[in-house]
Amino acid sequence: MESAPSGQGRSVGVHREWDRLTEVVVGRPLDFAFPSDPAGTQAALSFLPRGFGELGRHAAGRRWSQADPDGYARCAAQLDGLAAFLTARGVLVHRPTELTEAEQSLFAELSPVSLQIFVRDPMIVIGDTVIEASLRLPHRFKERFGLRHLMADMVRRGARRSVVPPGSPLPLQQVARAQGPYLEGGDVMLFGQDILVGAGQGGFATDDAGIDWLRRELGDGYRVHRTPLHPRVLHLDDGLAAVREGLAIAARAQFVDGLPSLIADWDIIDVGLDEALDQLVANVLVLAPGEVILDSRAHGLAEHLTRHDVTVHTLDFDAVTPFAGGFRCSHHPIHRTPAE
């Protein structure tokens, strides 16, 4: 499945994390090759969930489908299951076009990996603007190509398009000192005119140059808040989800300066940093104010959300999360209908 029919006649618009989801793109797996020297890339990929190292060593230099055929098949099935769930709710669902062999070969000498699972990161929709992001890990640069048909369609529908100047590519082992700007969708969270942008201290993703670029690009209509993150954290959405106005899921330990002032007086459902980073429990998909999709393993979080009158849907996602992303990472909203 490449992409759903065009959203012709629909507007593009996302303003808040919790508004009702009506149009979306959902990721897909690619049969990539694992790095042949997992020990050499360990520091650059230290944000990966604990337990990934064993898979990386077992699969070194091999295709995913060869090294872990069951995991590869289940990942595809779980992403397809998410797309089917959303379609059944009446959400218009798109999928990225599969990267060609030529596209997958780009920067392969710097990292052999090719991903299209986490479509949250290579594009960013803010209001009626779609931004082609700048991703720091060298193998992620190419992910933009699978979404360009969709971004072009959004422009035809009236969206404004912008591109973050790409950062300079470096081998995977050296990404912490790569020169940006870098700006990734997993670090960007929308609260109306206020936008939180994660700045991880591990040097895996968004940097200050990317945040400055976004601030200049959006102008006076938005307030962009730099949000420093723990060195183990890849993206802001690893440990934060705005379920509805006034209620959030948060791993407090990921915020080196404490909770952002924007949500300091909200009700917070706490999760630990380890469960946020190893199982991505806070990385939920918000369907509407007070309605979410949650990993079926997150029983405790589901109970806490239910006590806060949140409608919880659970889906299996255990074959996706080993790659450091959950439900939010695996989709990107194109339109959310604001609550009246």
Image (tube, grey):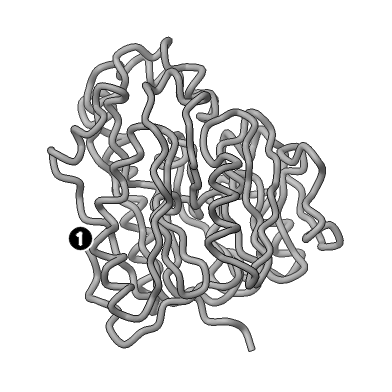
Q: Which residue is mark 1?
A: 2
Q: Is residue 240 left or right of residue 234?
A: right
Residue 64 visible within the image: no
Location of residue 199 in the rendering, given as x and y in whole percent from the top left corner: 63, 41
Location of residue 145 in the rendering, given as x and y in whole percent from the top left corner: 25, 51
Q: Is residue 287 above or below residue 285?
A: below
Q: Nearer the viewer, residue 204 or 337?
A: 204
Location of residue 250 in the rendering, given as x and y in whole percent from the top left corner: 72, 49
| Quarter of the image that includes the C terminus | bottom right
Q: Residues within 10 Å of mark 1 (few under 14, many from 20)?
A: few
Q: Nearer the viewer, residue 206 or 78?
A: 206
Q: Nearer the viewer, residue 218 or 152?
A: 218
Q: Is residue 263 left or right of residue 200?
A: right
Specify the amino acid type for callout 1: Glu
Q: Secondary structure at mark 1?
A: loop
In the image, what residue occupies the spot 86% across and 62% down?
A: 265
Q: Is residue 137 left or right of residue 68?
A: right
Q: Residue at the right extreme?
A: 265
Q: Is residue 228 left or right of residue 318?
A: right
In the image, what residue occupies the spot 51% across and 24% down?
A: 177
| Quarter of the image that includes the N terminus | bottom left
Q: Nearer the viewer, residue 157 or 306?
A: 157
Question: Residue 172, located in which quarter of the rendered image?
Answer: top left
Q: Is residue 207 above or below residue 329?
A: above
Location of residue 128 in the rendering, given as x and y in whole percent from the top left corner: 46, 75
